[in-house]
Image (spheres, grey):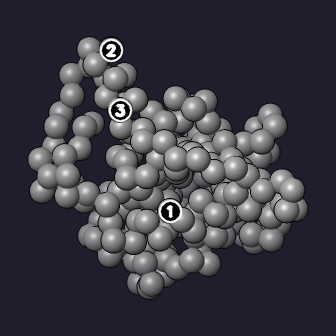
Amino acid sequence: MPLLASVSGIRGVFGDGLDPAVLVRYASAFAGWVRQRAEGTPLVVVGRDGRDTGDVCARIVTATLQSCGCDVVDGGLATTPTVAMGVLKHEADGAIILSASHNPAPWNALKLLSGTSEFLSPDEGAEVLDLAEAGPESFTVPHDRVGAYRQDDLLPYHIDEILETGTKTILLHKEDNQTGDYAII
C-alpha cells in the first residue's frame, strides 16, 4: 500500500508504507516547521485514537519531537477535537494527531495542527512536506536541547470548555468511532 503524503496529512497502512522511518521523517519535519515559528522552545501536543498501532506510533512521534528540540504534551487517547483543545489549553505551537479517521483499522495517519489549533493551510502543509525531504538529521538537536515530556488527560478540559460555553454536543455511540468508546464532538 503506498504512503499518501499530502498537505492534509500523511496516511498509510502501518507496516506497509507507514513505518517508523516515515513517522520519524514527517515528525521531524513538523518539528523543524514549528521551530521556525516558535519563540523559544516549541511545545507540541500529541494525541491518538484507539487504533492498534496508535500507541507505538505516538511514542515514535513523541520521541522524535523531543529529539528535535520540542517539548511535548502527550494527550494520550483523545479525539481530534480534544487534541485541538489541548493546543489552546497549553498555548502550544502545534499538534500531531495520530488518527486515520474513517479509514479501516490497519491505517494510521499524522494530522498536523498549527498553534491556532487548526489544520495546516495548504501552503503550511506544503512547507512541512518540503522539509521532510531534508531528512530527520537536519532537525535533531544536541543532547542538552532535547525537549521535555509530560502527560495530560485533555478530555476533562475539553468537557469543561463545552459545558462552560453551553455548546450543544453530539455523543457518538461506541460502534461509530475507531476508539470503541464514546466520543464527544
Q: Amino acid at mark 3?
A: Pro
Q: Assign the N terminus to one quadrant of the image.
A: bottom left
**Is 60 above or below relative to 175?**
below
Residues at marks 3 and 1 touching, judged by CB atoms closer than 8 Å: no
**What residue is disc 1 on?**
58
Viewer-side label of 3, 1: 3
Q: Position of residue 168 (x, y in %)?
A: 21, 22
Separation of disc 1 and disc 2 at Cα?
30 Å
Residue farthest to the top, as pictured: 165
Image point 80% across, 34% down: which residue? Answer: 39
Q: Is residue 65 above or below residue 137?
A: above
59 lies left or right of 70: left
Nearest the camera: 143 or 80? 143
Under tag 2, what secondary structure? Answer: helix
Q: Earlier in the sequence, mark 1 or mark 2?
A: 1
Q: Which of the marked residues, 3 or 2, is nearer the chain's N terminus?
A: 3
Which kind of residue does numbered mark 1 sit on? Ala
| Direction from residue 95 to residue 53 in the image, left or right | left
- Secondary element under disc 1, as helix, strand or loop, is helix
Asked whether residue 178 appears in the rendered view, the answer is yes
**Is disc 3 surrounded by few (<14), some (14 to 19) or many (20+) residues within 10 Å?**
few
Q: On the image, numbered disc 2 is attached to which residue?
A: 164
Q: Nearer the viewer, mark 3 or mark 2?
A: 3
What label does residue 156 carry, if any?
3
Q: Secondary structure at mark 3?
A: helix
Find the distance from the CA under tag 3 to the CA under tag 2: 12 Å
Mark 3–mark 1 distance (CA, rounded to whole Å): 21 Å
The circle on residue 159 is: none
Q: In the rendered view, tell whether residue 23 sits above or below residue 79.
A: below
Residue 40: x and y, percent? Answer: 81, 37
